[in-house]
């Protein structure tokens, strides 16, 4: 069959429903193939970063592979940042790029959209993906696609395929195994003996521990272990924390849920409990400065077990080829001593809720968001980079709700397009918490919502600039950004728009939004020096760490 048709059929076979992209002449044939009847549903946005974040949101929310299709050079290079984010945060994305054909490459002239060399884009993507391949040999193209997609799935990381424009119609042989295969992708296999030994070692330490604690990390979510992990910790009876990146991977109304651990700047109750722990069992949490704090880690190796990246590190020794799924399932079969403890949930919010007529503050905004979620739990909360990334840690999710944020790579611009992609894939409406600076990066992708029938609620926190840095910058005018008429823009793009200055007005706008079927933008005005409690702690700690010179 033609290579283009093979790609469409293959992606459909693995359950991909949508393709996110922007065409260009060097990818047009391939793009149109995907958009053909009986192809995939094509979703276009205004700008490639929006396309990339939407595909990433689709993948995070559905647990399927997010597919993007871009033109060579200008398009491919625009897509670099979202793909780098997907790489860092373990999101399975497949990037399909066009490219110049064989004949035109032989002309010896530079080809439009080219940067340094024709191969430069492929080289860039090698650096940002688990596998990057050029489909230039019809004889092996089908196997190359199959191998690459399996790697993307196994590693839960992006992959890159470059299809030059003269290859789309080329007929390729498809091996019988691929035709006979049912389309189920497999996660990596572990070494059984290593699993057994790692489990034995872990169980012995867990059963000897008096004050164990479990950290649930992002891998448990990516590898679809939410239910298994819940069963496991219920057997263990140990308190559970999540990390900035894995918030939402464990139900926040669960009696064992302690809250979000963010190293030394965690709420005091979590800090004390982690300090008292004689064993911290980390299930799939990456060791990042964001989660551990930029000081030496609070959780030291001698009293911890880390299962991540296909390995289990028990104190100072390591079991290789033990994948998180097999490890968790091994623990589920083991005899674990049940620990008993009354666990209390901790956040960073002041107890008192604001008066309705009081000027809006970030903590009041969070109280209102929590109130909204208690009444309308089936929402996906998406927190943008900036103050809202840290503010979002104090959002309390119900069992029916979800949470997405770029909690580690932390690129601004993920929120709005991520919410569109997530709703396209899962049907779930998002509540996006977004700074005005971040909204000015990709927020205008909200204009795509009406034509796809999407309805995110976007709270744009207007504090007049990039204010997370304000506590450590003296010349605050360097952080200023222009004011946009956010609510008015929303209305002219076919949605609803509100501008609120008090807690009461925010509550009313959120209630209106809950009733609305269109997208909604709520501009929430706060003072420039108002920040969430966690951002204040984070930015001070980070400034000390970087020994910033005050501008
Ligand atoms: C793409 C990108 N560029 C720059 C940054 C650095 N950065 C982090 S937060 C921030 C300011 C965020 O401003 P805003 O969205 O208004 O949020 P606020 O902190 O003011 O609530 C910047 C520039 C980033 N994280 N991502
Ligand atoms: Mg701002």
Image: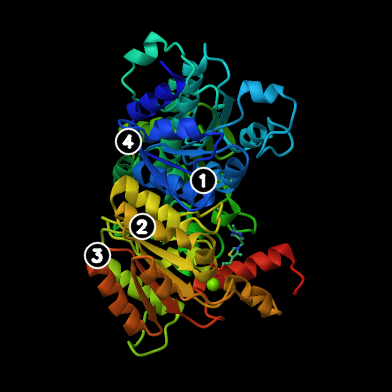
Q: Spatial distance from mark 4 to mark 2, Cα to Cα?
A: 43 Å
Q: Spatial distance from mark 1 to mark 3, Cα to Cα?
A: 28 Å
Dot 2: element: helix
Q: Mark 2 points at which residue?
A: 449
- Dot 3 or dot 4, earlier in sequence: 4
Q: Count neighbours of disc 4 (C-alpha within 10 A) and say few if under 14, some if 14 to 19, many if 20 or more.
A: some
Dot 3: element: loop
Residue found 31% across the figure and 20% down from its top? 182
**Could you tell me residue 381's position as x and y percent?**
37, 60
Q: Which of 420 and 335 is in front in this view?
A: 420
Eyeballing the image, is 431 above or below 350? Answer: above
- Dot 2 or dot 3, earlier in sequence: 3
- Dot 1 or dot 3, earlier in sequence: 1
Q: Spatial distance from mark 4 to mark 1, Cα to Cα?
A: 26 Å
Q: Which mark is residue 89?
A: 1
**Could you tell me residue 499's position as x and y percent?**
39, 79
């Amino acid at each position: 069959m033609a290579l283009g048709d093979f790609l469409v059929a293959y992606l459909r076979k693995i359950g991909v429903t949508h393709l996110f992209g922007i065409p260009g002449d060097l990818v047009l044939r391939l793009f149109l193939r995907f958009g053909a009847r009986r192809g995939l549903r094509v979703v276009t946005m205004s700008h490639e970063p929006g396309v990339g974040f939407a595909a990433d949101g689709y993948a995070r929310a559905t647990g399927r592979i997010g597919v993007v299709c871009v033109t060579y050079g200008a398009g491919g290079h625009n897509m670099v940042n979202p793909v780098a984010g997907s790489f860092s945060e373990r999101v399975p994305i497949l990037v399909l790029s066009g490219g110049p054909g064989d004949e035109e490459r032989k002309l010896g002239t530079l080809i439009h959209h080219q940067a340094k060399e024709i191969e430069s884009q492929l080289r860039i993507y090698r650096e940002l993906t688990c596998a990057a391949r050029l489909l230039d040999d019809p004889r092996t193209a089908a196997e190359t696609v199959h191998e690459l997609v399996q790697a993307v799935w196994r590693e839960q990381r992006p992959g890159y395929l470059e299809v030059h424009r003269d290859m789309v119609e080329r007929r390729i042989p498809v091996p019988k195994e691929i035709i006979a295969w049912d389309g189920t992708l497999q996660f990596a296999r572990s070494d059984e003996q290593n699993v057994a030994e790692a489990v034995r070692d872990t169980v012995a330490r867990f059963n000897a521990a008096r004050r164990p604690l479990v950290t649930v990390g992002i891998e448990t979510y990516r590898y679809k272990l939410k239910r298994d992990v819940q069963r496991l910790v219920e057997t263990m009876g140990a308190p559970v924390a999540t990390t900035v990146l894995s918030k939402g991977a464990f139900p926040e109304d669960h009696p064992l849920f302690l809250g979000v651990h963010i190293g030394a700047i965690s709420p005091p109750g979590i800090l004390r409990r982690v300090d008292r722990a004689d064993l911290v069992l980390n299930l799939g949490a990456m060791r990042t400065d964001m989660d551990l704090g930029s000081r030496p880690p609070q959780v030291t190796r001698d009293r911890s077990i880390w299962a991540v990246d296909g390995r289990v590190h028990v104190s100072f020794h390591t079991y290789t080829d033990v994948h998180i799924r097999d490890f968790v399932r091994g623990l589920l079969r083991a005899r674990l001593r049940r620990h008993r403890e009354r666990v209390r949930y901790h956040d960073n919010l002041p107890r008192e809720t604001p008066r309705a007529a009081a000027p809006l503050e970030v903590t009041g905004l969070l109280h209102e968001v929590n109130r909204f979620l208690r009444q309308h739990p089936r929402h996906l909360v998406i927190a943008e980079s900036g103050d809202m990334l840290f503010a979002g840690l104090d959002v309390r999710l119900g069992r029916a709700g979800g949470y997405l944020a770029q909690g580690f790579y932390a690129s601004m611009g993920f929120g709005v397009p991520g919410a569109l992609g997530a709703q396209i894939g899962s049907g779930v409406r998002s509540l996006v918490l977004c700074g005005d600076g971040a909204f000015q990066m990709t927020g205008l992708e909200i204009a795509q919502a009406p034509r796809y029938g999407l309805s995110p609620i976007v709270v744009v926190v207007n504090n007049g600039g990039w204010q997370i840095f304000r506590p450590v910058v003296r010349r605050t005018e360097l952080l200023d950004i222009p004011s946009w008429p956010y609510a008015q823009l929303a209305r002219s793009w076919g949605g609803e728009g509100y501008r609120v200055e008090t807690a009461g007005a925010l509550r009313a706008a959120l209630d209106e939004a809950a009733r609305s079927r269109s997208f909604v933008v709520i501009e929430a005005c706060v003072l420039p020096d108002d920040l969430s409690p966690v951002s204040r702690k984070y930015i001070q700690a980070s400034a000390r760490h970087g020994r910033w010179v005050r501008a």
